[in-house]
Image (cartoon, helix red, strand yellow):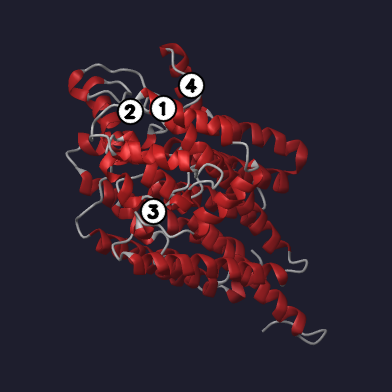
């Protein structure tokens, strides 16, 4: 045992009390916002159809369960969430119990991550502050209400980083635990695959390159287990080996192609893609914002296409001439804005844009949305200050680099595929919060150490 630890750290009892309070706060705040009324969306329905087919027909399909058609589907939904829904249904639970379970899982993972982090930094004060922030975070607290993967995906990313923090505390990679966390996170959401990068990076840092290669291979096998099983199944039933971001085979490729080429912000999805996808043409004018698409494609010709779409009866099939016009517009105009510029604009919008649909997941409307945006920008500001003050403080660069190794590839992947809904960033937020708090903690400690007269020690 480090003698300094025995002198400065509080008893395990006091730490357990803090963690217990954090767990209670995280649970009660989220259950209070849930108020027995979970939010069910069209995406929620896709998960339920998969789950119902698993229960009734023992197949993984988006076909109507009562039809017993079991048409094989790949889709953008991994099997993790449908399996959870099916298990809850098998035990007699419903939508409310699903929301309660994902809330409980998130609260437990928060406590576990805080404990793993505490074993690394050994600061009771930081443990308490980080616990309060994670328990009441305005960017995650409302999402437990939604029957979507955001809360469990956030728990998955936090679990992986908890194992990384535990590895840093022990100065050895917790390989098997990290492998299990990775496998579970990816089974819940495909874009959790980017967690593999910081996991392998921590292995190389702790084990060296020679031993790190073996550990990286094991982590890679764990990360690709569920996707590999699904890819083999897809090959056997004649589906593409990789899932499509847009899973509905009935959606026009021309509409998807235009959306992917033109979208700059979330409104391009909610104001254009969704109404055309669902054949709710009367809704096109209600949410549409022309600034949400690339100016190079926001032409008089496209405005005429919008007018013609809005004149269609709801439920009508998309006319072939409109599909052709959209495709021609993309082919003739799509290269006017360089791809890197388009991606940078999308990155700025997904971070900063006002969410007009979900309002940061909470029930507070625009006020909650404003708080969430101010909070995110405050986190970035604190992080920049910590990095400026970092100097050679190794822990700041470690914790920041590991987060960026996960966040940047995931963000680029999202915007490259026009995934511009603000909620897609939710799985990253708990790790971002811990990263910023840890960086600030070590920056303050470095400044304090450097300001002491030479030869003195901290009291």
Q: Which of the two discs, 3 and 1, sits closer to the camera?
A: 1
Above or below residue 163? Residue 430 is: below
Question: Disc number at residue 318?
Answer: 2
Crowd band around label 2 with a 10 angstrom C-alpha radius: few (<14), some (14–19), many (20+): some
Q: For mark 3, what is the residue?
A: 106
Crowd band around label 1 with a 10 angstrom C-alpha radius: few (<14), some (14–19), many (20+): some
- Where disc 2 sits, the SS reads loop
Q: Earlier in the sequence, mark 1 or mark 4?
A: 4
Q: Which of the two discs, 3 and 2, sits closer to the camera?
A: 2
Q: For mark 1, what is the residue?
A: 323
Q: Earlier in the sequence, mark 3 or mark 2?
A: 3
Q: Are marks 4 and 2 in contact (CB under 8 Å)?
A: no
Relative to residue 339, is residue 99 drawn left or right? left
Crowd band around label 4 with a 10 angstrom C-alpha radius: few (<14), some (14–19), many (20+): some
Q: Are marks 3 and 1 in contact (CB under 8 Å)?
A: no
Give the Cα separation between the discs numbered 1 and 4. 31 Å
Q: What residue lies at 50% left-to-right and 65% top-to-bottom?
A: 376
């Amino acid at each position: 045992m480090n003698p300094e630890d025995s002198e400065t750290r509080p008893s395990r009892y006091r730490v357990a009390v803090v963690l217990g309070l954090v767990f209670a706060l995280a649970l009660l705040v989220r259950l209070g916002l849930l108020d027995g009324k979970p939010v069910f969306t069209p995406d929620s329905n896709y998960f339920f159809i998969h789950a119902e087919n698993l229960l009734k027909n023992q197949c993984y399909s988006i076909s109507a369960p009562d039809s017993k058609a079991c048409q094989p589907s790949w889709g953008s939904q991994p099997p993790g969430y449908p399996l959870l829904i099916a298990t809850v249904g098998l035990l007699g639970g419903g939508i409310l119990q699903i929301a309660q379970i994902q809330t409980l899982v998130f609260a437990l993972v928060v406590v576990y991550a805080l404990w793993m982090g505490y074993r690394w930094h050994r600061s009771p004060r930081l443990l308490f502050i980080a616990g309060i922030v994670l328990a009441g975070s305005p960017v995650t607290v409302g999402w437990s209400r939604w029957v979507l993967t955001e809360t469990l995906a956030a728990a998955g990313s936090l679990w992986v980083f908890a194992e990384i923090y535990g590895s840093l505390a022990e100065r050895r990679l917790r390989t098997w635990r990290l492998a299990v966390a990775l496998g579970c996170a990816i089974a819940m959401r495909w874009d959790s695959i980017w967690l593999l990068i910081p996991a392998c990076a921590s292995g190389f840092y702790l084990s060296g390159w020679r031993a790190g290669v073996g550990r990286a291979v094991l982590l890679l096998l764990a990360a690709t287990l569920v996707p590999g099983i699904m890819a083999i199944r897809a090959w056997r039933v004649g589906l593409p080996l990789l899932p499509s971001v847009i899973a509905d085979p009935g959606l026009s490729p021309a509409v998807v192609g235009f959306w992917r080429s033109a979208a700059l912000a979330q409104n391009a999805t909610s104001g254009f893609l969704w109404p055309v996808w669902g054949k709710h043409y009367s809704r096109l004018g209600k949410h549409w914002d022309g600034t949400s698409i690339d100016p190079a494609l926001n032409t008089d010709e496209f405005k005429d296409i919008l007018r013609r779409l809005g004149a269609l009866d709801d439920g009508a099939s998309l006319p072939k001439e409109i599909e052709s016009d959209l495709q021609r517009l993309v082919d003739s105009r799509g290269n006017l804005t360089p791809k890197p510029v388009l991606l940078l604009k999308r990155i700025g919008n997904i971070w900063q844009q006002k969410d007009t649909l979900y309002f940061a997941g909470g029930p507070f409307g625009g006020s909650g949305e404003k708080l969430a945006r101010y909070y995110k920008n405050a986190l970035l500001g604190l992080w920049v200050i910590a990095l400026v003050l970092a100097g050679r403080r190794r822990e700041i660069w470690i914790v920041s680099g590991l987060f960026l190794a996960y966040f940047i590839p995931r963000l680029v992947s999202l915007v490259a595929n026009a995934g511009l809904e603000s909620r897609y960033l939710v799985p990253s937020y708990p790790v971002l919060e811990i990263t910023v708090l840890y960086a600030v903690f070590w920056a303050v400690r470095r400044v304090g150490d450097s300001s002491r007269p030479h030869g003195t020690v901290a009291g």
